[in-house]
Amino acid sequence: MFKLTVTVTIVAAGIAAAIGLAAPASADTTTDAYLTILENRGIYAEDGDAHLIRAGLTVCDMLDDGNSLKSVGMTVYRNTDLSAASSGYLVGASIAAFCPQYEVLIPGLTTAGESAV
């Protein structure tokens, strides 16, 4: 699980900075950035972008329900064809784009994508 945690940490830091979540962003801009970042990583959904968006929002719903970051990452891994690294990437991207209030769960990340490293 160390690999998944490290991936989530790095991804969330980079994505938060790239999307500029420290400043208010429109939903379309944030969603477009999320999809672009996943696409650049080679993460696609056979049934289109709507599926990736639902996956990202589901990550946030799971965190809202009190699931741990590790549990969410493992659920993504077990229920998709993604590798552990790509699952962590999707979780980090989802947090940065759709529920940045959970960035505090990511080790090594301080506020709005600022890396403590």
Image (spheres, helix red, strand yellow):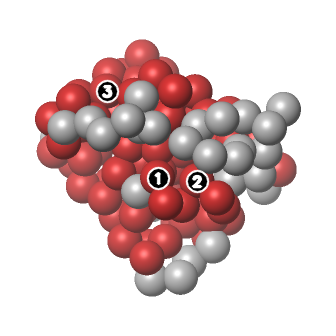
Residue situated furthest top in the rendering: 40
Quadrant in the rendering for residue 88? top right
Give the vertical position of 83 relative to 44 (above or below): below
| Cα distance in 3D space between marks 2 and 3 | 17 Å
Using the image as rendered, state which of residue 72 and residue 94 is in the foreground.
94
Q: Which residue is mark 2?
A: 103
Please tell me whether residue 41 is drawn above or below residue 61 in the rendered image.
above
Do tag 1 and tag 3 residues touch (Cβ < 8 Å)? no
Residue depth check, mark 1 versus mark 3: number of the one nearer the observer? 1
Q: Residue furthest front?
A: 23
The residue that mark 3 highlights is: 33
Towards the viewer: 44 or 53: 53
Q: Is residue 107 left or right of residue 19?
A: right
The CA span between labels 1 and 3 is 14 Å
Indicate the position of residue 68 as horizontal and vertical percent values.
63, 73
- Residue 98 in sight: yes
Residue at image location 55% in from the left, 42% down from the top: 112
User: In the drawing, does residue 8 fall left or right of residue 26?
Assistant: right
Which quadrant holds residue 24?
Answer: top left
* Residue marked by disc 1: 100
